[in-house]
Amino acid sequence: MTTPLFLEIDNTPRDYAWGLVDGVAHVRGTAPTGRKEAELWLGAHPAAPSRVVGDAPWQTLDEWERETGEVLPFLLKVLCAAEPLSLQAHPSTAQAKEGFDRENTLGIPLDAPHRNYRDPHAKPEMIVALHDGFEALCGFRPAADVQTDLQTLAELIDAAPDAAAALQTWQRHLAGADGIRSAFLWLLSGDESLPALVAAVTTVAERDPRFALLARIAEAHPADPGILGALMLQHITLRAGEALWLPAGNIHAYLRGSGIELMGPSDNVMRGGLTGKHIDTVELDRVLDAREGGDARLVPEVVSDGIRVFRPAGRGTPDDPGFELYAVASDGEIALDGAAIALVTDGEFELASGDERIAMPRGRAVLISRAASVQITGAGRLFIAVG
């Protein structure tokens, strides 16, 4: 049996605590559920593979991968955040393979809460904002700028001696060799002086607009040292259609908003605060990119008047992410080199190739099962992820 080129797929939104009520339904234009909807996974990841809708030889995309030999080198997500996610970084391909093999040798179960590497794959990712005001923390600020803020805090918490002493320790770490790395990891060290510092900084942030972001983070994650870590990171706000690229080692956290996220098909996460989950500072140190500054925004390339493509850095290198994301607003044609997933978030489209075609109303997701030249008609907002 010849595999149809276009197969409609779907999945159940994941209800993580930080999700937005009816978030995925709002993006897809479907009926509200009244529940938190944090992510919709579109892909073959075994933790939540997409379902094939209608008549097909496979029920899920992981079955499709196993039986056809095709591989989707990505996971496409709709992400809807009402509250800050955890601070996190992801390993490179080499780090993921070494860590996965090491933890297997140690006999750590794949589902153990303290397991860091659940597969041997990298997890680079990009996100495209669906609406104005998508916020994220992404990469480290220059150490000099952080020191300026710490000096301001020192003047404001002078009446709290324990906190003031801890702040001086933070400043010393930041001023030393490899200061960004040393200071950030100290905040996660469990030092007995940190709770007083977190409490004092939170109190300042609640009344001083210069630190309003920290106050907002503290509402979602009270007493978490990640509140202090957030001060060391770049705060970026995207407009609709703008994107971030987060390669291996980049420390980041999405704060609020809805976006289309494209990543490696991996579940390897090293957390660095703003979470009740396992934090392994030794492993985080191994993968962390502690360079200062840098612009995480990913500028798309123009394919035609109505088509842009986001191509991450690293193509053709050992850390090639193996994917790219097309953003389509109107008629055009795309030559796809491999299997792809398409999703409409606004308007209506039709996809066609040879004798095969499929209607794409708002909210519909489709697997394009093999390489093909696809003609696109319609208008709105269509995303196509391809490996």
Image: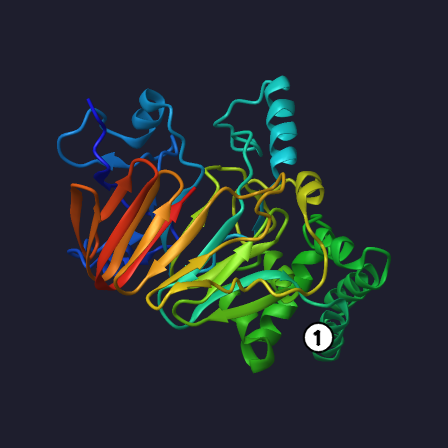
Residue at 71%, 41% (x, y): give it: 286
Nearer to the camera, 76 or 189: 76
| Horizontal and vertical percent position of residue 260 | 38, 56
Image-quadrant location for residue 145: bottom right
Query: What colour scheme has been applied to the protein in the rendered image?
Result: rainbow
Identify residue for label 1.
149
Placement of 266 over or under 382, stated as above or below? above
View extreme (right): residue: 177
Quarter of the picture containing the N terminus is: top left
Compared with 324, 338 (above or below) is above
Residue 107 visible in rendering: yes
Q: Is residue 67 above or below residue 167?
A: above
Percent position (x, y) of residue 278? 56, 40
| 271 up-or-down from 254: above or below | above
Does residue 284 appear to the left or right of 321 in the view shown?
Answer: right
Q: Quadrant of residue 58?
A: top left
139 vs 16, nearest the viewer: 139
Percent across and percent down for residue 247 are 58, 50
Residue type at mark 1?
Answer: Asp
**Residue 380, percent from left and from top:** 24, 65
Pick the front one: 30 or 4: 4
